[in-house]
Amino acid sequence: MAAPATTRTGHLINGKTSFGDETDVIEVLNPANEQVIGTVPAGTPADVDAAVAAARAAFPAWADTPADERAAVVRRISEGITARRDEIAQQLSAEVGIPITFATKVQATLPAATSAGVADLIASGEFPFTEEIGNSLVVREPIGVVGAITPWNYPLHQIMAKLAPALATGCTVVLKPSEVAPLNTGILAEILAEAGVPAGVVNIVHGTGPVVGAAIAEHPDVDMVSFTGSTRAGRAVSAAASETIKRVALELGGKSANVVLDDLDEAGLTKAVKLGVANAFINGGQSCNAWTRMLVPASRHDEAVELAVAAAAKYVPADPTDPATRLGPMVNEVQRDRVVGFIRAGAEAGATLAYGGPEKPDDLDDGFYVRPTVFAGVTEDMPIAQEEIFGPVLSVMPYDDTDDAVRIANNSLYGLAGAVFSDSDDRALEVAKRLRTGQVVTVDGTTGVVTTAGETR
C-alpha cells in the first residue's frame, strides 16, 4: 500500500477549518523513511480561547439533546470510522510507523469498537443518568467543556476513547492531538461533520504541549481535563489544572509486570512467554500497558529466556507498509535514541543481552528502527527494570517464590497494568489481587472495550 500523499491538516474551531496565520507550522514525518508527509498549524493560546468559547457556547444545546440522540451521533461516528478503516490505517501507518496489518486490524478498528460500545451503553438505558440511593435522587449531569489531550502511540483510538463518552454524556470537547501524529484528525473532522456533530461540540487545536496543552489545562472555562501521556507531562497538566480547581483524569506511563507462576507445565510456560513477548512488542513496544517486565521462577529463568529469544526473533524490523511486517520503526528520532540509550544502559548495568542490541538493524539505512531486544538476569535496581522505555525491550527477571514475585512486581513507580499466568484460575486471581495496579489480565483473558481501567500510582 502506498503512503498517503503529503497533506495539510488544520484546526477545527466552531465547525470551520482554520490554519492560523500559516507562518508557524509543525512538520509531520514518516518514521519509516524520515520524509515530511504533512503539516499542521502550531496553535496558540488565542486558538485555544476561540475553541473553548465555541465549546462553551455549544454546551447548553448539546447537553439538552436527548441521550438517545447523542448516542445515535456517536454510533454514526463509529460507522464513519469503519467505512474509512483502510484509509485511516494507511494514514496511521504513515504517521507512526505502525505495521499496516496491525494498523488495519487494531489501530483503525479499536476507535470504532470503542465508540460503538459507548453508543450501545447509552442507547440501552443501562447507564444510570438518574439513580435513587436511599431517600436521595442522584442525577449524573454532563460536566461541561472537556479538554482532551491525547498521545501519538494509538492516535485515533485514544481520541475516541475520550471523545465518545464525552459526547454521549452531553459534554463538549476541545481536543489537542499529539503533534507527532495529528494528520489523522483531518479524516476524523470529516467523519464528525458527516455524523451530524453540531458546530462547536468538538473542536481540534493542533500544537505543542507546553503551548496548546498548557493553555487548555489552565483555561478557566474548561471544566475537566482528560490527559493520556507521560508521567512528566501528566504532572504539568495536573499542576496547571489545579489553578482553576477543575477535574483531572490522567492515564500515565507504565512498567507492567507479567508474573509467570511456577505451576505451569512446559506448554503453559511456552504460551505465557510467547504471549508475553507479543504484548511487550506490540505496536513496537510503544504501549503504556505493555508487559515489559517478565517475572519467572528462578529455576526456569534460562528456559524462559530461550523461549523469549525464539519469540523475539520473529519480530524483524521492516517496512511497515508490508503486510507481513510485525515490527516497524520507532515514531521519531527522539524515541529511537531513547530506546537505544536504555538498551546500552541495560548492558552497562550488568543485564545479560540475550537478543538484539543497540546497533541499527541491517539493511535499514533510513528510518528510526531499533532491534527487538531481550535482556536476561535483570534485577530490580537496573534502569531497564524501573523506567518506561516505550520500545521493543523485554526484561526477564527471576524470582524466588510467589511472595518475592509480588514484591518485585509492586516495586515500581507505575501502577497501570499487569498479567498473571498460572495453571490455576484461583491462584492467578489470588496473585492478581495482590498486585498494586489498575488492570490485571489473568491467564489469557482480555478486557472489554467499555471496561474502565484505573491506576494505583
Image (cartoon, rainbow, N blue to C red):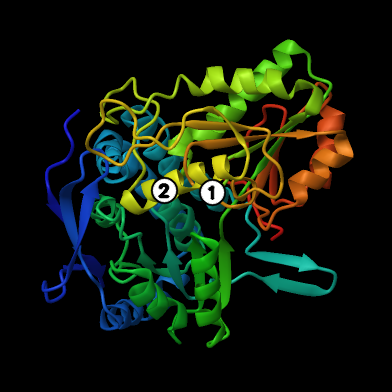
Provide residue 105's location: percent of width, then percent of height.
Answer: 40, 30
Provide residue 54's location: percent of width, then percent of height.
Answer: 31, 78
Q: Residue at x 31, y 44 (%)?
A: 80
Q: Quadrant of residue 419?
A: top right
User: In this figure, which residue is indicated by the disc labeled 1?
Assistant: 288
Provide residue 432's location: percent of width, then percent of height.
Answer: 79, 40
Q: Is residue 412 above or below residue 117?
A: below
The amino acid at mark 1 is: Cys
Q: Quadrant of residue 8?
A: bottom left
Res 143 label: none
Question: Mark 2 falls on what kind of element?
Answer: loop
- Label 2 environment density (alpha carbons within 10 Å; few <14, some 14–19, many ≥20): many
Question: Label 1 near label 2: C-beta < 8 Å?
Answer: yes
Q: What is the number of callouts on the image?
A: 2
Provide residue 182's location: percent of width, then percent of height.
Answer: 29, 56
Q: Quarter holding the C terminus?
A: bottom right
- Label 1 environment density (alpha carbons within 10 Å; few <14, some 14–19, many ≥20): many
Question: Mark 1 falls on what kind of element?
Answer: loop
Is residue 15 in view? no
Q: CA distance from mark 2 to mark 1?
A: 9 Å
Q: Quadrant of residue 268?
A: top right
Left or right of 257 on screen, residue 231:
left
Q: Is residue 83 above or below residue 168?
A: above
Res 153 label: 2
Left or right of 231 on screen, residue 10:
left
The amino acid at mark 2 is: Asn
Left or right of 107 on screen, residue 272:
right
Q: Residue at x 83, y 46 (%)?
A: 434
Q: Residue at x 34, y 74 (%)?
A: 212
